[in-house]
Image (cartoon, helix red, strand yellow):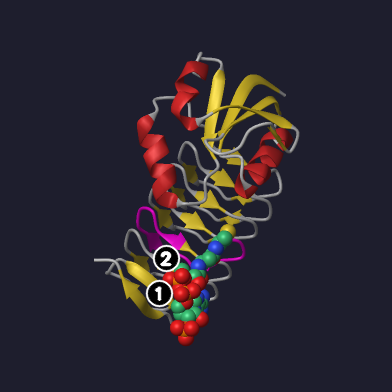
Amino acid sequence: MSQRKLIIIGAGGHGKVVADIARKTGYRNIFFADDHESGTCVGYPIVTTSEKIEKYNDGETDFVIAVGNNQVRKTIAEKYDVNWVSLIHPAAQIGINVKIGGGTVIMAGAVVNSCATIGKHCIINTCAVVEHDNVLEDYVHISPNATLGGTVHIGECTHIGLSASVKNNINICENCIIGVGAVVVKNIINEGIYIGVPARILKRFI
Ligand SMILES: CC(C)(COP(=O)(O)OP(=O)(O)OC[C@H]1O[C@@H](n2cnc3c(N)ncnc32)[C@H](O)[C@@H]1OP(=O)(O)O)[C@@H](O)C(=O)NCCC(=O)NCCS
């Protein structure tokens, strides 16, 4: 059991799940920071807004961001010099030689296989599969039930949607959204939204 405090930034739906992981991994002093909510969230007090979290940075407090939007997570992470912790659900499976960056959350039923490298402030959501030798840059979100084959590279801030699949040895560049159920079989080099089987571009960002 951890005596340290934990502040979860974001008291929305994702925050509720992160609080459950925190409790299951031994945190007992759990608080939320949220700019739009007050009161409590799943029984834990909302004590401040994201603007004021630094006053809680007393050396005895850990922090994690529970915001699904990758760009927002990045903005918050870059703003504060605090102890960002990674949280791993006890029912997730983590292989040998896996590297996990600070602030990353790995949810129930997720599998991260051997020699995968996951950056800072990523979300590996419920039952996602990140196969061996993957490299996920910072602020990536792999949605529930999505599957990445072996040796996939995902660029910073890219979001892989619910139940999407990425073929082995594929590179997807930064700032992409892969839609629900898409199947990516070719490298993606332009930032944008991709949908369908096989995945094709819906909208280009730049
Ligand atoms: C791909 C996505 C980003 C598109 O969102 P959007 O830009 O708002 O696009 P729209 O909803 O306006 O849809 C545009 C068109 O694409 C279609 N479309 C949207 N998402 C689709 C998908 N995943 N697969 C196939 N077609 C899709 C729509 O039906 C619509 O078609 P139409 O023009 O013939 O009516 C979104 O639908 C999506 O899949 N987001 C991922 C959600 C997710 O995984 N969340 C995780 C929560 S943990």
| Extreme-left residue of the structure | 206
Going from the N terminus, do you reach mark 1 or mark 2 first? Answer: 2
Is 136 part of what is drawn in magenta? Answer: no
- Determine whether, in the image, residue 98 is placed left or right of residue 32: left
| Residue 133 sits in quarter | bottom left
**Residue wearing tag 1:** 194
Q: CA distance from mark 1 to mark 2?
A: 6 Å
Q: Nearer the viewer, residue 41 or 88?
A: 41
Q: Tell whether circle 2 marks a residue whose Cβ is less than 8 angstroms from ligand 1.
A: yes
What residue is shown at x 75% (from left), y 33% (from top)?
Answer: 43
Q: Amino acid at mark 2?
A: Ile
- Disc 1 C-beta below 8 A from ligand 1: yes
Q: Amino acid at mark 1?
A: Tyr
- Dot label at residue 148: none
Q: Position of residue 106 (x, y in %)?
A: 59, 47
In the image, taking residue 23 as reference, residue 172 lies left or right, namely: left
Magenta segment: 144-159
| Along the viewing direction, whichever of 132 and 107 lies nearer the viewer | 107
As drawn, the label of residue 177 is 2
Task: Report the residue at 55% width, 53% height from top.
Answer: 124
Q: Are marks 1 and 2 in contact (CB under 8 Å)?
A: yes
Label 2, secondary structure: give it.
strand
Whether residue 167 is visible to the viewer of this picture, yes or no, is: no
Q: In what quadrant of the picture does the N terminus appear?
A: top right
As displayed, is residue 185 above or below residue 72?
below
